[in-house]
Amino acid sequence: MTIHLHKGDLPANLDFGKSVAVDTETQGLSMVRDKLCLVQLSSGDGDAHIVQMDRASYDAPNLKSLMSDVDVEKIFHFARFDVAVMKRDLGVVINPVYCTKIASALVRTYTDAHGLKNLCKELLNVDLSKQQQSSDWASDSLSQAQLSYAASDVLYLHQLQRILTARLMREDRMHLAQACFDFLPTRAELDLAGWHDVDIFSHSFR
């Protein structure tokens, strides 16, 4: 594995192919308080590119162009958060999207453990370390442990996508998954507008 750290933006003309695995790191999980610090990407080749954001400007034209490219599929785990935080701080609408957490919830109905660590262990026999999950991602100088943790969140998403898609097709649920993926940009807009903890489809919401 090679980790490439980029300050402020991706290099120009970096080609991830037709699909790119994406994750983000923020200072916390608040859509109001916690700003985007890192964006991690991988083409599924075993290497990771990590963009350390300039939180004063978020001037990252190459990253924004990639995220907005409708010809490149973006693979996330828990895309709802990442899509929303990048919409908020980068001003981009991300589409098309694939979310391994949604795919898992639709097809691994024998469990309620849909975290990335759970998926990697069961489907790939890979043990992910979550030791750096609570970390100061806004630090100017990131440790090797932080970089390795951040990279690990994107290195396996292509493999998980292939396995989960095969199972979705086996169970005839791919159309449901696709509908959920297509809704994610709208779900992100609802979160940013204040409906993050309200189920607007619920009968009790009236």
Image (spheres, rainbow, N blue to C red):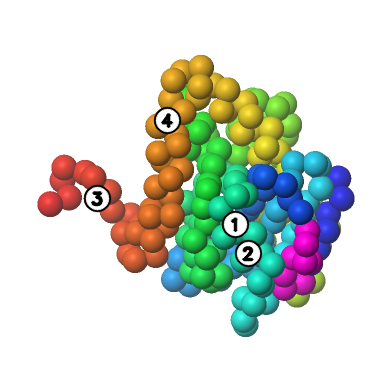
Q: Earlier in the sequence, mark 4 or mark 3?
A: 4
Crowd around label 4: few <14 · some 14–19 · many ≥20 (10 Å): few
Mark 1, residues whose alpha carbon is within 10 Å: few (<14), some, or many (≥20)?
some
Tag 2 and tag 1, C-beta contact below 8 Å: yes
Q: CA distance from mark 2 to mark 1?
A: 6 Å
> Was residue 73 drawn as part of the magenta stretch in this picture?
no
Instruction: Tell me residue 198's x, y (percent).
Output: 28, 53
| Extreme residue toward the right, this view | 2
**Which amino acid is tagged 3?**
Ile
The residue nearer to you, when weighing 184 against 28, is: 184
12 left or right of 176 in image? right
Q: Horizontal and vertical percent for residue 56? A: 62, 82
Q: Disc 3 to disc 1, how far (Cα)?
A: 30 Å
The kind of residue tagged 1 is: Asp
Residue at x-position 64% and y-position 59% = 66
- Looking at the rendering, the stretch of residues picked out in magenta corresponds to 7-14
Q: Which residue in the protein does label 3 denote?
A: 200
Q: Is residue 74 above or below residue 196?
A: above
Q: Which residue is mark 2?
A: 65
Q: Are marks 1 and 4 in contact (CB under 8 Å)?
A: no
- Disc 1 target residue: 69
Amino acid type of the residue that numbered disc 2 sits on in the rendered structure: Ser
Tell me the tag on residue 181: none
| Earlier sequence position, callout 1 versus callout 4 | 1
**Res. 204 in view:** yes
